Amino acid sequence: MQNNKVLLSEIGFFREEKKEGKLSIFRDYSAIVYQVSELISYGVSEIAINALCDKDDILKSIPDGFKKRIIFVDQKDEARKKSEIILHPIAVELSIEFKDLNSFSFSEGTFFHDEFTILFTNIRDFFIGIEEQLLIDIDLVAMRNAVFTLRNNLKSSDSMQSLAMLSGLLGSYEETSIDSITLIPTASGELVELFNRFLEDELYKELSQENHNLGIQNKIVRSKTIISRLTKDILKKPFAKEIVDLSAKGLTVASGSPMPSSKTFDSLFSSIYLPPVAPIKPMLTIAKEKWKKANPEIILPKWDFSS
């Protein structure tokens, strides 16, 4: 069974420092401790980073206790390529200049460019979540509305095929909640030790695996029941009693009607995994506030300019 992994857009936060009238802005990797501590509530065991990031620089910079918990995903760029296959016919019909997921452009007055923008900014993370079986944070409501509008206005068979696939995928998602554990704020040095202690705990490993199973439609109901039991069992552990609270977390899972058979989807994906969607961005905002308040010792990026 797989452990639960979460896709993050960034590791660490930017810090501002003013000295001698000069403002410096730099990434501080001490923040990863606070980011990860918020994600324990979803049974996260590993942090997934887009492979486009500089892997060596990140691994040199983050605290040793977290290095083995970082994975780099979409290393063959498959999710990007598949995203482009889906978006290309839509862009053609809308007369949007679109070569890849790095950029697109359109003339003033182009219809439905807002809807295209929503798909453009969310689809790669969605497909990475499918490919790599990750917990993700995308704007499902905005994507559904964009697909609905485009399906009612576009005509080409290729566009409609892409939109029908997206509509089937997104339409299967429903909101739910799960029991979870939340770390009580503590010193950053202790957080590293606590996180690794959780990850070595057999109950937490089970919890992580069941959270991962929330992306498999026929396992969702059973996994939610097991998650509820495991969170309560973890709270009984001596090392957890003083540092963990019980809470409930919301997320959106593909527990609705199964997606109709789609040749487009079947040609792109072999996975039956539809990634749970969680409000990760607000959680990271909370993590940033805790990090600012704690003001831990700075961990600067360790760039290698030799190459």
Image: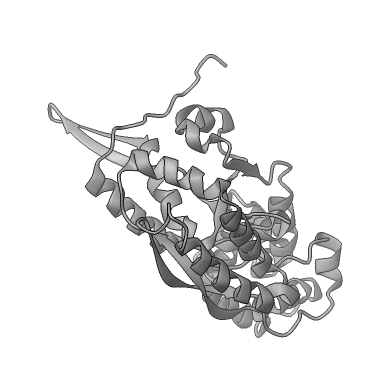
Question: Which residue is at the front of the view, 136 or 37?
Answer: 37
Q: Residue at x 57, y 41 (%)?
A: 70
Say which quadrant the N terminus sits in.
Answer: bottom right
Position in image of residue 202 (x %, y %): 61, 53
Q: Nearer the viewer, residue 139 or 106?
A: 139
Image location of residue 112, percent across then percent down: 56, 74
Residue 113 seen in the figure: yes
Front residue (pair 264, 196): 196
At horizontal 50% and vertical 20% (from top left) the residue drawn is 304
Residue 195 coordinates in the image, percent (x, y) = 47, 47
Specify the color scheme: one colour
153, 299: nearer the viewer: 299
Specify whether 93 is left or right of 21. Answer: right
Residue 93: x and y, percent?
70, 69
Q: Quadrant of residue 165?
A: bottom right
In this picture, residue 260 sits left or right of residue 207: right
Measured along the vertical axis of the image, is residue 36 above or below residue 55? below
